Image: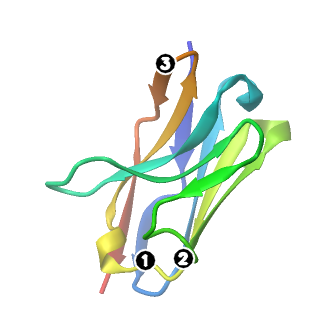
Amino acid sequence: QVQLVESGGGLVQAGGSLRLSCVVSENIFNFNSVGWYRQAPGKQRELVARINVGGRTDYADFAKDRFTISRDNGINTVHLQMNGLKSEDTAVYYCHANKLSRDYWGQGTQGTVSS
């Protein structure tokens, strides 16, 4: 059973930073990609950033230049460093992993940006 456990959410002022972490229960190289999505109240879940098995990264336009995804292979963890946060970044952030056409999700961590 694949498990994704997020941490690092919280409350921060606009312009501040948050660092999210996702611990995966097995070797992250078993997955096509591991990444982050977010869902704001009343909105659809959307991709934030992901990193594939080869190390290629993809970012949503809003995340470029502000967010950085990285992985720590030794501890099967993927991080999302978020800088220059805006109130519109307030959302529940979900870790996501894809393997053999199956999607796995974490329980989500709340990130709130006060203006």
User: Where on the picture, by quarter, is residue 10?
Assistant: bottom left
**Residue lying at 71% horizontally and 49% vertically, measured from the top left:** 56
Cα distance in 3D space between marks 1 and 2: 7 Å
For label 3, the residue is 102
Q: CA distance from mark 1 to mark 3?
A: 34 Å
Q: What secondary structure is marked by label 1?
A: strand
Amino acid type indicated by mark 3: Arg
* Amino acid type at mark 1: Val
Instruction: Give how far across and how far down residue 90 sits, in percent.
Output: 32, 67
Foreground: disc 1 or disc 3: 3
Please give left or right for residue 22 compared with residue 85 in the image. right
Callout 2 secondary element: loop
Q: Quadrant of the C terminus?
A: bottom left
Q: Quick check: 49 left or right of 115?
A: right
CB under 8 Å between discs 1 and 2: yes
Pick whichever, 89 or 60, lies toward us.
60
Q: Which residue is mark 2?
A: 17
Instruction: Say which mark, if any, is on residue 81.
Output: none
Tell me the colour scheme of the image.
rainbow
- Dot placed on the residue nearer the N-terminal end, 1 or 3: 1
Q: Which residue matches tag 1?
A: 12
Q: Is residue 107 left or right of residue 57?
A: left
**Residue 113 image offset from top left, x and y in percent:** 35, 75
Choose the circle earlier in sequence order: 1 or 2: 1
Q: Residue furthest right?
A: 74
**Between disc 3 and disc 2, whose residue precedes?**
2
Q: Is residue 44 left or right of residue 32?
A: left
